[in-house]
Amino acid sequence: MSQIQLLPAVQALLSQPGRLFLGGTWQDAASGRRFVVENPATECALTEVAEGDARDVDTAVDAARTAFNGEWARQSPAQRGLLLLRLAELLDQHREELAQLITLENGKPIANARGEAASAANIVRYFAGWPTKIEGSTLPVSPASGAPMLNYTLREPVGVCALIVPWNFPLTMCVWKLGPALATGCVAVLKPAEQTPLVAIRLVQLIEAAGFPPGVVNLITGLGAATGAPLAQHPGVDKIAFTGSTQVGRLIAQGATSNMKKVSLELGGKSPNIILPDADIVRAAKGAADGIFYNQGQVCTAGSRLYVHASVLDQVLEELRRHANAHVLGPGLDPSSSMGPLVSARQLSTVSGYLQRGLEEGAELICGGGRPAHLERGHFIEPSVFLDRAERACIAREEIFGPVLTVMSWTDIDELVLRANDSPYGLAAGLWTRDLRSAHRVAAQLKAGSVWINCWNVVDPASPFGGYKQSGWGREMGKNVIDAYTETKSVFVDLA
Ligand code: NAP
Ligand code: MG
């Protein structure tokens, strides 16, 4: 086992406690408290980070408001675009460092972390193009008086945005939200997950280096109940953008009603992936395996329910077993590892609990199902596949957020669509087929924000992303997200 060397910039970040960034100043929490950030591959402490509370949240929100009403409001759209471009360049220049931090605190293999860092730069670059293209319209109004009347709309930034993000894609989740917030002229208070504050700290250092005015982006590290909750309930916050569990999403939506904050939510999923009998079975099975095992299964769009046509079930199970067994589990910093640990002991305990319940509820274990014997430390779990003929086990219905696939078989396509849609979630869905007619007909019937045909987990900053049903409110990416960070003002001018 040989691991890559940590860059000096990463070592420097780990050598001192992480701090909050409030109003353009790096500082300790008002309480002076800190919490430990752990490496999930070794269970050793990486460093300590400031543990914010409601007082720091107040400072952050005040600083954001001051920036929103001050220097930031005077920057032209072109200037905002230029700052975002500069940030994208910095993200590219520091890609390896960001990737190392992602792997250290999240656990994912370094190649995937590099991919995440590259994607973050691309997303910021995409949003850099938006400020100069956010436009209103002139509308053909018909006043009863017959007076000549001009009506036009303006799109204005919503204001102070609370951005609360999870640990599974600790860098891209930040820029999915910061990109549109900054492009539209909003200001932000960013709260990363407690497991992954380090890459967020480095990102905010790069935001500072890019030249964004003080207070435009503020960073609050800390625990959900002590920082996320007061931020989500704060009367000075105009909008919340949240990605995480449906349970916390519900709390956030409730807290937002006090001052009617705008809310967008990206929540959980239990996404159906469907293999039709005419599919390229080898490709479909590889896609299904990647769709559940990527990022150790800790993906909101994980293809965790696989519906395979009965005529090809045995072949698909064989391929899935082969792909699962081919994974090399190990620390993400070892380039030969293709699967890292789960993010935390808690996540390991949740996923292990589901493996146990799957067996108890009568699902048939095809492969995996436990902890790898050769790894003594770290929150590792084997990539696992169950066959659930009755589709009754909780592993067929509940979000596991781990590398656990539940396979079911089907014969009638109309009945299958009902089964696929029979879920409180509606984030993603996919199908594998060579038949154009079934592809588009089934895609139209699936209740999901993203449908992937002969692919999985394709996400692009130009294309909307989000969930039906309990998978969320609103869409990120593309034009939709620009609308979500702006208010529309309708202006009437009496020309009589
Ligand atoms: P989570 O608790 O929903 O965490 C998401 C973010 O919300 C974190 O920054 C978290 O801070 C913060 N938070 C927690 N409680 C809060 C509150 N009361 N008010 C405001 N913010 C709050 O998710 P998790 O505990 O990390 O993971 C639990 C489950 O959520 C997973 O097993 C998975 O099923 C799901 N999940 C989904 C996604 C997704 O992409 N949709 C991502 C991650 C997790 P702390 O980190 O300090 O708790
Ligand atoms: Mg939590």
Image (cartoon, rainbow, N blue to C red):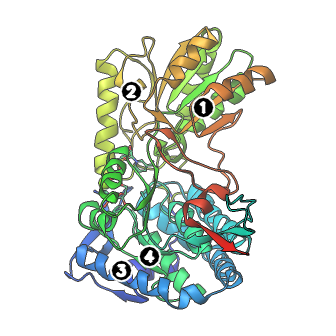
Q: CA distance from mark 2 to mark 3?
A: 41 Å
Residue occupied by mark 2: 395
What count of labels does the image hold? Answer: 4
Q: Quadrant of the rendered structure where residue 415 is?
A: top right
Which of the numbered marks, if any, corresponds to residue 60?
3
The residue lying toward the viewer, choosing from 100 and 129, is 129
Which residue has dot 4 on it? Answer: 201
Q: Secondary structure at mark 3?
A: helix
Separation of marks 4 and 3 at Cα, in angstroms: 15 Å
Q: Is residue 115 visible?
A: yes
Q: Three-letter amino acid code at disc 2? A: Ile
Disc 1 and disc 3 in contact, CB within 8 angstroms: no
Q: Residue at x 57, y 74 (%)?
A: 182
Expressed as whole percent of the image width and height from the top left, the position of residue 204 reads: 49, 78
Gap in angstroms between the C-alphas marked 1 and 3: 43 Å
Q: Report which residue position mark 1 lands on.
A: 288
Q: Amino acid at mark 3?
A: Ala
Residue type at mark 1 is Ala
